[in-house]
Image (cartoon, grey):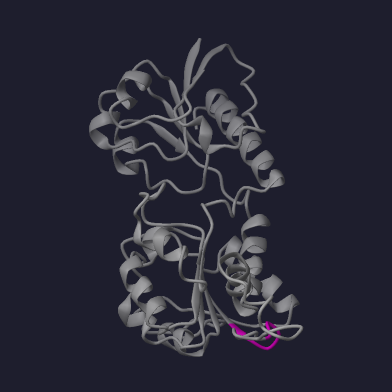
């Protein structure tokens, strides 16, 4: 009888459950688990199911029964993968489940930014601008065409490639960024700095690594057009949030849309969250680009499959 502990059940919408394994098991789940609670809850687990709970070397070394960490996401940054391998703990994540919903979310953000939807909506919430403008409409904010605009994509995996396909379908020109500091430019890619200079919209779809942390910073933001927009649906730490906020407030760039932040959930006084309340050129969604019904269904089924396959094959 294997003990399975799901440490952060609320990481999956309540409308979906992970199918229970066919083999004999005890299944215990918690809505969320703090760092102080993790050991006590995981100490007898053969399998841990989690999305974002931190599992570092020191903790893993104190869990001799643990055989599998089944991650209910693509990212594995919360697990010390080197320590897990040394301790003989298998780590299985899920990829590709959000390859439809994230690109659609990005496309929605592009339309919102290019058509200043947030700015016009913000007016209706905070003022009587339309009612008092004296005519049938007002045009205080820029409305620019998506067709013909250039989209710079950082990351050419499943998500980045699908974003490019959707963008091309609505008439955008798409360029893929070469790695920063690359000495040769691969076919189908554009030099790193040139993408910042040419793009009307930049969208990030790269993993979080030492090389990509703070990829968007004061220096790279300074390369962008003042009419350009930034979208981040990858990982929060890819963006230097302080530098981005300064760029938005000074109108160094035209706007940004973020589905991820460095700290999640953010503090109530998080500068970007507070800024989003007053800056109509900043759109923030709470890390939900991945969470369409079909994507979540695929995710939970794949997590169940990963657990079943591990128990049957040991890998």
Q: Main secondary structure of the magenta part?
A: loop
Q: Is residue 174 magenta?
A: no
The relative height of residue 99 versus residue 307 in the rendered view (above or below) is below
Q: Position of residue 174 (x, y in %)?
A: 61, 81
Image point 37% across, 56% down: which residue?
A: 262
Residue 176 % position (x, y): 54, 78
Relative placement, left or right, of 51 versus 169 is left
- Answer yes or no: is residue 11 visible: yes
Of residues 57 and 287, the one drawn nearer to the viewer in this rendering: 287
Whether residue 190 sits left or right of residue 219 in the image: it is right
Up/down of 261 relative to 84, above or below: below
Give coordinates of residue 15: x percent, y percent.
67, 33
Between 220 and 303, the one lying in front of the other is 220
How many numbered markers are drawn?
0
Q: Residue at x 60, y 15 (%)?
A: 23
Query: Residue 11: x, y in percent?
Result: 52, 38
Q: Can you see residue 154?
A: no
The part of the chain drawn in magenta is 145-150
Image point (55%, 44%), residue name: 94
Would residue 2 appear left or right of 89 to someone viewing this image? right
């Amino acid at each position: 009888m294997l003990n399975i502990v799901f440490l952060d059940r609320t990481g999956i919408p309540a409308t979906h459950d992970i199918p229970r394994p066919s083999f004999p098991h005890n299944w215990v789940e918690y809505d969320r688990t703090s760092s102080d609670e993790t050991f006590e809850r995981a100490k007898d687990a053969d399998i841990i199911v989690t999305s974002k709970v931190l599992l570092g070397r020191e903790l893993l070394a104190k869990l001799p029964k643990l055989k599998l960490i089944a991650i209910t996401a693509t990212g594995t940054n919360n697990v010390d993968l080197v320590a897990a391998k040394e301790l003989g703990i298998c780590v299985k994540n899920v990829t590709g489940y959000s390859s439809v919903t994230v690109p659609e979310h990005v496309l929605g953000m592009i339309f919102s930014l290019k058509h200043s939807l947030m700015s016009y909506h913000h007016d209706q919430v905070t003022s009587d601008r339309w009612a008092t403008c004296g005519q049938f409409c007002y045009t205080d904010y820029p409305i620019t065409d998506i067709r013909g605009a250039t989209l710079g994509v950082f990351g050419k995996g499943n998500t980045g490639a699908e974003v490019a396909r959707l963008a091309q379908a609505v008439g955008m020109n798409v360029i893929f960024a070469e790695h920063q500091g690359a000495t040769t430019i691969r076919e189908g890619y554009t030099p790193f700095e040139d993408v910042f200079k040419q793009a009307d919209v930049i969208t990030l779809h790269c993993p979080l690594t030492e090389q990509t942390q703070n990829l968007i910073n004061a220096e790279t933001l300074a390369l962008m057009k003042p009419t350009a927009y930034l979208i981040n649906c990858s990982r929060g730490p890819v963006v230097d949030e302080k530098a981005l906020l300064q760029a938005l407030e000074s109108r160094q760039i035209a706007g940004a849309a973020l589905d991820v932040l460095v700290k999640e959930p953010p503090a109530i006084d998080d500068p970007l969250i507070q800024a989003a309340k007053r800056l109509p050129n900043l759109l923030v969604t709470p890390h939900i680009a991945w969470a369409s019904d079909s994507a979540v269904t695929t995710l939970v089924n794949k997590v169940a499959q990963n657990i079943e396959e591990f128990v049957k094959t040991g890998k």
